[in-house]
Each structure stands twice: as C-alpha cells, then as structure tokens.
Amino acid sequence: MTDTPARLLKLLSLLQTPREWPGSELADRLDVTARTIRRDIDRLRDLGYPVEASRGSVGGYRLVAGSAMPPLLLDDEEAVAIAVGLRAGAGHAIEGVDEASVRALAKLEQVLPSRLRHRVSSLQNATVPLTRGDGSTIDPHTLTTIASAVTGRERLRFAYRAGDGTDSRRQAEPYRLVSTGSRWYLVAYDMDREDWRTFRVDRVSEPFATGSRFTPRELPTGDGDAAEFLTRSMARTQPGLHLDVTFRAPAGFVAARLPATLGAVEATGEQSCRLRTVSSDSLEWVALRLALVDCEFEVHGPDRLVEYLSGLGARLTRAASLGRSRGRHG
C-alpha cells in the first residue's frame, strides 16, 4: 500500500482492535516492509496516538491509554450504535447526559455517510422509549442543530411555542444548552427583544443556523454560568416549590432514587432522612418523583403538594378498587 495517509488509517484501524499486533503481521496486512511499519508507528505517535511496542520473538504493537483522547476510527456498526445511543439519551434528557453528549452527537452525525444516517434514523423511529416523569421528548435533530450553532457561534432562527400556546418566530444568538435532568433549555440572546431569554427546547421547532457569525455577549450573571442564569430566570418566572419531606428510609436509599436537581437529603436517623429544598419543577412531576422513591414518606409542605398527593392517592385507590371488583365478577 503506497498511499501513506490511507495506510496510516488502515494501520490505526487495526491497532484499535484490543490485541497486540506483531510487526510482521502488520507488514503482511498492509503489504509493506517491517521498516515501513516502524516509520508509520512513529508517525502515529507524533499525531498523539500512544502506541506501545514490546520486544522479543513474540513482541509487537498495541494502542494503549494515553494522557489525552486521540481521534477514533469507527466501523459502520460501531458508528451506528454510538449515534443511536447518543440520540436516545439526548432526545429524552436523561439525567447525567448533558451538553457534551449533544456536541458529540452533532460531530458524529456531521460526518456519517448518508447510508449510516438512514440506518440511525430507521432504528430511532422503530424504537419506543420508556420514559419516567413528565420530561418531554425532543427531536435529536433540534438538539444537534442548536448545539452546532452554539459551538460555531452562528445566529439561529426557530419557531417557538410559549407555555400559553402563543406561536412566534425567533432569531437569537445561542449561548449554551442546559439540561436539568428532565428538560433541555437554550440560553440565548433574543435579537428581536434585545434581551437574554431561556427557551424550552421541546417547544422549539424548525431550527435553522443562518451562517451569520457573532461574538458571544456577556451573561448578566457576569460569570458566564448558563446554569445559574437559567436557575435565576426560572425563579423569576414561576414560584418555586418549597419542599419539606421526611422519608422512612436510609438517606443513601432515598438519594439514589431522587434526581440530583431536587437537592441533597439529610439523614435524621438510620432509617429516616429529610429533604428541604426549593424546586422549580411542576407540582405533578415532583409528586411523581417522590412516589417513585418507593418508601413511606410524609410531606410537611407546601400545602398544595399535600393536597395534590391526597387527590392522587384517592384516584389511585379508586382505580385499584374498580380493578379488584371487575376481577371478582369477571
């Protein structure tokens, strides 16, 4: 193989297989001399790939972990698997899957051949996700378009539906995407309103990167922290729920079953703990997440959460009673 770039890519693809390759076998695979293999190994090292060599009659080369992440080569099946996984996570705002996942998805989908993009879309469309809570699903294309505009500092046009159902067209300078664990938000400077705004991404449609570049403005918070800006913005636009809940279970058990966005629980005994926090999430979502902890608990406040849980409990009790009654007479 006389084409050096193509040979290096083939060599790298072989080395990314988790095994040690004798130099003679690599030379045979690439139809070159052992000396050429040694030179190509040096080239890969210069590019940042940590290739380790072992001596002896059974020695060879293998790719090892380094201090930085070099580019990877993926075959078709690997690329499809990663893209589907990232789209599933990003589209449903799974807790812990943040903007970095969306940026990775945007980069991957940008270079996927059309045949692989079609496979990814087909798999995604044929899959029914199991979601919890009231987190809204999002078109992954919307997320990747926004993420690319953020990274490329391109102005963005999109349609937006407000909470009251009002539709509008927006032009904005996208600053950051923020995941709360149940939803995605876009922090951006609204060009028409000449002010900073936060947009729920599940209410965004038809996003289009205009190609017009901009220099990012400074957030009003002064520290560039988009998550902090979102928190303050939500606190201004909707009253928070001042939660005070006692759980009849160990703190570790409860903490593992509550989203981090609800804050930390405080142990009050070996078999009890308490949650005191302010949540900007909906009453219904908070009630459901408390129930999903799967232990006895008591809500000390707010009163409207107590009332909602009381009504929900009554409805669930009636539903169970009707089901038992029909079972006896069925």
Image (spheres, grey):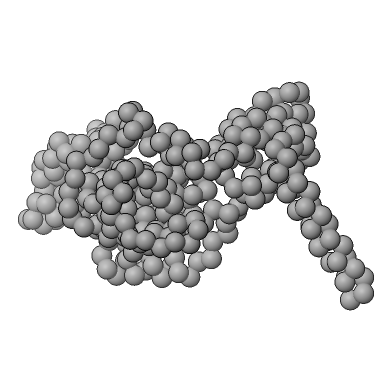
Judging depth in this view, the residue of 103 and 192 nearest the camera is 192
Closest to the observer, 160 or 276: 160
**x and y percent of residue 322 in the render?**
85, 66
Q: Residue 105: percent from the left, percent from the top?
A: 34, 53
Q: Which residue sits at x=75%, y=53%?
A: 312
In front of the other: 58 or 164: 164
Which residue is outermost to the right?
328
- Answer with the quarter of the image where residue 143 lies: bottom left
> Can residue 114 be spotted in the picture?
yes
Q: What's the residue at 75%, 43% (across, down)?
A: 306
Q: Would residue 35 appear left or right of 89 to someone viewing this image?
A: left
Q: In which quarter of the image is residue 125?
A: bottom left
Q: In which quarter of the image is the C terminus?
A: bottom right
| Image location (x, y in percent) of residue 132 | 60, 53
Q: Quadrant of the N terminus?
A: bottom left
Which of the 4 quarters of the picture holds residue 262? top right
Residue at 27% over, 68% down: 114
Whether residue 49 is visible, yes or no, is no
Q: Identify the residue at image location x=13%, y=40%.
A: 43
Identity of the residue furthest to the front in this view: 193
Decide if residue 291 is on the left or right side of residue 225. Answer: right
Q: Residue furthest bottom?
A: 330
